[in-house]
Structures are given as structure tokens and as C-alpha cells.
């Protein structure tokens, strides 16, 4: 046969495949109706494994065996998505333990932030809650999470990501550890300044203090100077240290606001590498609430440590037409080379597509935690 005849033969086979696929989906619909009546779960891992082994045994070489495995994994994934959609249509998608609210109750709210006065966290707090907020600060991120966990604060403001230095790893780990939830976010521009005691000259400086991310964000400028770089838990703490110790060999990298707060002189403005540098802060509370107009969801997943696990998990976003905007991984303590995945995607917990995807994710992941809708 010539090429055109071979292509016609492939077209004929493809039509048969499409017809068989639609026939299979019709049967899957009937299976879903049975599961709705009996309350059975959609995902049956043992059944799917047996099915995959069975169809692989029908092939005649390793290449076809692997191809058939991928094909039927995808077919069964599509079948599950159809069944989840039917469950949702029948009101059987289950309730999520989050309550929708029109607005956050911020009047007279107690807000905690990490760092000292003059920190970027304080600036983010004022931007989100206003200048007259009832606030206090603590030394560590853990202290801030503990404050809302135990009820001494209603909200915490925490930096989670910088546009140039990346994520703040500790915040991701604390979101898993504590039963606290994201209800808002605030992005503020970052302009780092080199701060020192009034009258200090550049040649007098020997040590520079700042948060590790701020040191990274100012790496090019710092590389021009032979200064010892010392990490601090917060930029404002660095400014406070320089102001208190009154040592002209010390300088801090912090905001202009921190310099004004502690009476330091700005030796150089805008020393961060990127002109468009900004930090994203999250607003966290211990209540399972979300604003009804929220449009971003964050969640954490643990999945089986085996080939294809992440691929199948992500298919729930694809087949529910949800736009995933971010994915990060963090190692799981005491389980070498296994990771948690943190995912951000667009949507609202009241949306049917979101409910559909979350049901599938919850059934197929080892564990899933919704970190917030905001």
C-alpha cells in the first residue's frame, strides 16, 4: 500500500477508537449512577492496577506494553473525571469545612507580624489592615503562627515569596504544621537601602546585617564590597541592632522606613538587584473561612512516591479547566527524597469545577490540605 492508503487505514482505526471511547464513557456514566445509589467511592486503586496488568498482557512487545499502559491510565483518568462530575451534579460531592463570608472581620482585630517596627511585614500589614490596626510583633515566624493558633491574635502577616529570591521555605512548612489558613495576600514593592549610623563613611563599614533573602536580593551590590555578611531573622532587627550598638563598622540592609524608625542614615538606596523586586505576604487566621469573592486557592498534597503520580494528580486541574498558577515542593521530614507539593490555582471553593477537582485530589492523594481561598 502507498502512503495515502496507509493513512486512510489509520483514519478508519481512529474512528473506531473514538466510537469505542464514547461507548466506554457511556458505560462509565452507568457505573457512576450505580456508585451514587450505593455510596461507593470513585477511585478503586486495586481495580485499576488489575485492569492495567490485564491490558498490558494482551500486547506483543515491550514498546506496545508501555504505550497501552499510558493509554489506559489516561482513559481511566477521564472516566474518573466523568464520574466525579456526575457526583457533583447529583449533589454528592461532599461539603468542604470552609465557610464563605462577605468580608473579613478586621474591626478591632489583633494582628501579629514577625520582626520589629520598620519591617516590610509591618508595611504589608498597614497596607492590608490600615494605619490604625491593633498590632504587635514577635521575633520568629513560628511565634506568629503560635499567636493565632492559641488565640492571642486574630490574624498574622507573613512573607511567603519574593519575586527574585523565591519562596520562604519556613512559611510553607509552618502552614502544614499549624491548623491556620490563608484568607488574604498583600504584595508590596521592595527597595533595600544600606543603612548606618549618621556620619558613617563607606570605608568604615566591615559587617552588614540583614535577612538572608535580602542579602541574596542585594548580591551584586554586596559583591562590590569586602564586607562580612551576617544573617538576621528580620531586616528591621538588623536596623535596630545597628542603631542600638552604635558601631560605625556595622551597617544594615533594610527599608527606608526602618531607617527613619531607628534614626539611621541612608548611605545607598535601591541596592537590590532587581528594580521590580516585590514580596508577597499572606494573611493567616485560625478560622476556616474564605471571602465569597476569593479567586485563588492554595493547597498541599502528598502523593505516592511512584512513576506518574504527579502527572495524574495534575490532570484534575486540566480536565476541570482550572488554571494552576504555581507549584512548589518541600521535603517531607524523616522520609528521604519524598516531597510535599504546594499548589496555587485560580478558583473559589464554591465553584462546582473546584469541588469536582478537590474531590478527585482528596481521593487519589495520600493526603491533602486546603491552605486557604483568598
Image (cartoon, rainbow, N blue to C red):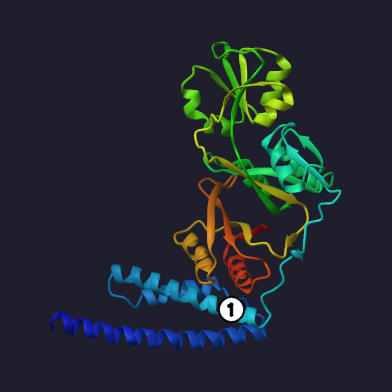
> Which residue in the protein does label 1 denote?
85
Instruction: Name the residue: 49% across, 61% down.
Output: 309
Instruction: Name the residue: 75% across, 59% down.
Output: 288
Q: Give the class, few, some or many, for how many residues have Cα within 10 Å of label 1's Cα (few <14, many ≥20).
A: many
Instruction: Name the residue: 77% across, 60% down.
Output: 103
Residue 299 horizontal/vertical position (percent): 62, 57
Instruction: Name the residue: 64% across, 82% down.
Output: 89
Q: Is residue 51 left or right of residue 249?
A: left
Residue 225 horizontal/vertical position (percent): 49, 19
Seen in the picture, residue 334 relative to 359 is either above or below; the reply is above
**Quarter-of-image position of residue 199:** top right
* Circle 1 SS class: helix
Residue 233 visible in the current orientation: no
Seen in the picture, residue 77 relative to 106 is either above or below; the reply is below
Seen in the picture, residue 282 relative to 135 is either above or below; the reply is below
Total numbered labels: 1
Where is the C terminus found, in terms of image quarters?
Answer: bottom right
In this orientation, which residue lies closer to the viewer: 362 or 366?
Answer: 362
Residue 216 visible in the current orientation: yes
Q: Is residue 52 left or right of residue 298?
A: left
Residue 53 horizontal/vertical position (percent): 42, 73
Where is the N terminus found, in terms of image quarters?
Answer: bottom left
Amino acid at each position: 500500500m502507498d502512503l495515502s492508503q496507509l493513512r486512510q487505514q489509520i483514519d478508519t482505526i481512529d474512528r473506531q477508537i473514538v466510537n469505542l471511547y464514547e461507548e466506554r464513557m457511556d458505560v462509565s456514566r452507568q457505573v457512576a449512577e450505580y456508585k451514587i445509589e450505593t455510596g461507593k467511592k470513585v477511585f478503586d486503586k486495586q481495580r485499576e492496577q488489575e485492569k492495567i496488568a490485564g491490558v498490558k498482557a494482551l500486547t506483543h512487545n515491550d514498546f506496545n506494553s508501555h504505550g497501552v499502559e499510558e493509554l489506559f491510565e489516561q482513559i481511566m483518568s477521564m472516566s474518573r473525571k466523568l464520574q466525579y462530575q456526575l457526583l457533583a451534579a447529583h449533589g454528592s460531592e461532599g461539603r468542604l469545612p470552609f465557610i464563605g463570608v462577605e468580608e473579613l472581620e478586621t474591626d478591632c482585630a489583633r494582628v501579629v507580624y514577625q520582626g520589629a517596627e520598620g519591617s516590610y511585614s509591618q508595611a504589608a500589614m498597614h497596607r492590608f489592615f490600615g494605619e490604625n490596626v491593633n498590632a504587635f510583633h514577635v521575633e520568629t515566624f513560628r511565634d506568629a503562627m503560635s499567636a493565632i493558633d492559641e488565640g492571642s491574635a486574630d490574624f498574622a502577616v507573613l512573607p511567603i515569596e519574593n519575586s527574585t529570591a523565591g519562596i520562604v521555605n519556613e512559611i510553607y512548612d509552618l502552614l502544614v504544621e499549624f491548623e491556620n489558613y490563608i484568607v488574604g495576600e498583600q504584595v508590596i514593592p521592595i527597595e533595600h537601602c544600606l543603612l548606618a549610623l549618621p556620619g558613617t563613611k563607606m570605608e568604615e563599614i566591615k559587617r552588614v546585617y540583614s535577612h538572608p533573602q535580602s542579602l541574596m536580593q542585594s548580591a551584586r551590590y554586596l559583591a562590590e564590597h569586602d564586607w562580612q555578611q551576617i544573617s538576621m531573622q528580620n531586616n528591621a532587627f538588623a536596623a535596630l541592632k545597628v542603631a542600638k550598638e552604635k558601631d560605625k563598622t556595622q551597617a544594615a540592609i533594610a527599608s527606608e522606613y526602618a531607617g527613619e524608625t531607628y534614626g539611621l542614615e541612608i548611605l545607598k538606596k535601591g541596592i537590590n538587584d532587581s528594580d521590580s523586586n516585590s514580596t508577597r505576604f499572606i494573611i493567616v487566621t485560625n478560622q476556616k473561612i474564605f471571602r465569597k469573592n476569593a479567586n485563588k486557592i492554595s493547597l498541599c498534597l502528598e502523593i505516592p512516591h511512584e512513576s506518574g503520580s504527579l502527572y495524574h494528580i495534575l490532570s484534575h486541574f486540566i480536565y476541570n479547566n482550572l488554571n494552576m498558577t504555581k507549584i512548589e515542593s518541600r521535603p517531607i521530614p524523616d522520609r528521604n527524597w519524598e516531597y510535599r507539593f504546594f499548589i496555587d490555582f485560580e478558583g473559589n471553593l464554591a465553584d462546582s469545577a473546584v469541588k469536582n477537582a478537590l474531590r478527585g485530589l482528596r481521593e487519589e492523594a495520600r493526603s491533602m490540605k486546603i491552605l486557604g481561598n483568598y
